[in-house]
Amino acid sequence: MLQEVHVGHKFLADYQSVVVRPLIEEIRELAEGLKGARVLHINATSFGGGVAEILYTLVPLMRDVGLDAEWRIIMAEQEFYEGTKITHNALQGNAIGLDETQKRIYEKNNRLTSESLGKGFDFIVVHDPQPLLLRHYAGDLGAKWIWRCHIDTSTPNQEVADYLLPYIQHYDTALFTLNDYVFKGLDIPIKVIAPAIDPLSTKNMALSPEDADYVVSQFGVEPDRPLLLQISRFDPWKDPLGVIDAYKIVKKEFASVRLALVGSMATDDPEGWSFFTSTVEHAGDDSDVLILSNLNNVGNLEVNAFQSRADVIIQKSIREGFGLTISEGLWKAKPTIGGNVGGIPQQITDGESGFLVDSVEQCAEKCMWTLDHPKEAKIMGRAGKEHVRANYLTPRLLRDYLKLFTELKG
């Protein structure tokens, strides 16, 4: 079945203070030709990941400019999510693929879900592998179908990629974050569109230093000690264990430094709990390592406060489709260190708006440089914020979708 996700209201006019006027005008002009168009977004979870965060803003903004947009999530048995997590990892290069039983569960749940779709949509946007097979089982339903891949598929497990490829071919177009992610052999129209963050959301709105200090103090973070921070799911691809190892190196030079690892447990990530446990075990009994999740009442405001308070923001990913936490950190004008993978180099210009690293040792070195050079780090943070303003805010993403819908309609 598909369950509707209820979203609040967003107004494009509110973004005039953070993006340039020509972009707002272009959006309104494109929307005029799409008034009343029915748009359905489908993914696997309403919280705990970047896709959900994007849709909580994108869907209401589409409504504000005149489209009839809605968002639904696929609801399935636990075995389905266990299989789709294997699929996700395989598409990012893991050697373990799907067995025949897992394929049957995957296909069965997509087939049953397709029966609840209904007709009347002009555009159906399917996000990531979990609901990918819906187009195959539902038929076109009179709509233009778009598959949006948010993950790094540059070096996929070829067996899994070959299994999914015929299903992707049914779509009218496919969206990827980078050209390098496009499946080999895919011969439908392709678009490259980067994700974006909402600068007015609770997670990204401006917080005063006093407010940020107050919020993080509730979790035992002292205002006068340097703080390293990684915000991400507890996932081996995000390498929180490597972040802990880098912190241990930094601590030899900066004895007062603390590390916070803050993540969210998502319903479509059954591996999250076991890796959360592995992360806690890797930290050992070091009381200066703080490991938190949404189950500790860490929501968007708290994430904002941690990012606003941090001295260094890290996203030491081994694989990363894009890494919205990079743009979030840069938007707070914070010096940001990211793994030199996937979509992270799109956001960080190495040495200008942050640092790109390939190892634990490099991560530690750049953390120590940042702590040692606060003036230079502040300049880098400002440069990063302007880069995000120009490229990675939600109005730009809205514009890109409207352009795509206009092309498909034509």
Image: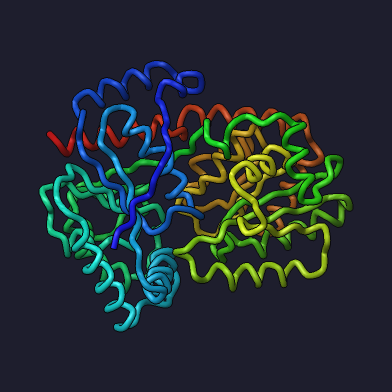
Residue sitting at x 30%, y 67%: 161
Residue 375 location, x and y as percent? 77, 29
Residue sitting at x 51%, y 28%: 389
In this rendering, is residue 404 above or below 283? above
* Lateral position of residue 226 relative to residue 90, left or right: right
In this rendering, is residue 30 above or below 313? above
Residue sitting at x 14%, y 36%: 409
Residue 278 location, x and y as percent? 65, 72
Classify residue 359 by image quadrant.
bottom right
Classify residue 182 by image quadrant.
bottom left
Viewer-proximal residue among 61 and 252: 61
Q: In the picture, which quadrant includes the C terminus?
A: top left
* Lateral position of residue 238 relative to residue 310, left or right: left
The type of colouring in the image is: rainbow
Classify residue 75 by image quadrant.
bottom left
Q: In the picture, which quadrant includes the N terminus?
A: bottom left
Tell which residue pokes out farthest to the right in this image.
255
Residue 77 location, x and y as percent? 37, 73
* Lateral position of residue 363 relative to residue 51, left or right: right
Residue 374 location, x and y as percent? 78, 34
Viewer-proximal residue among 208 and 76: 76
Viewer-proximal residue among 189 and 397: 397
* Lateral position of residue 267 relative to residue 44, left or right: right
Badge count: 0
Viewer-proximal residue among 276 and 99: 276
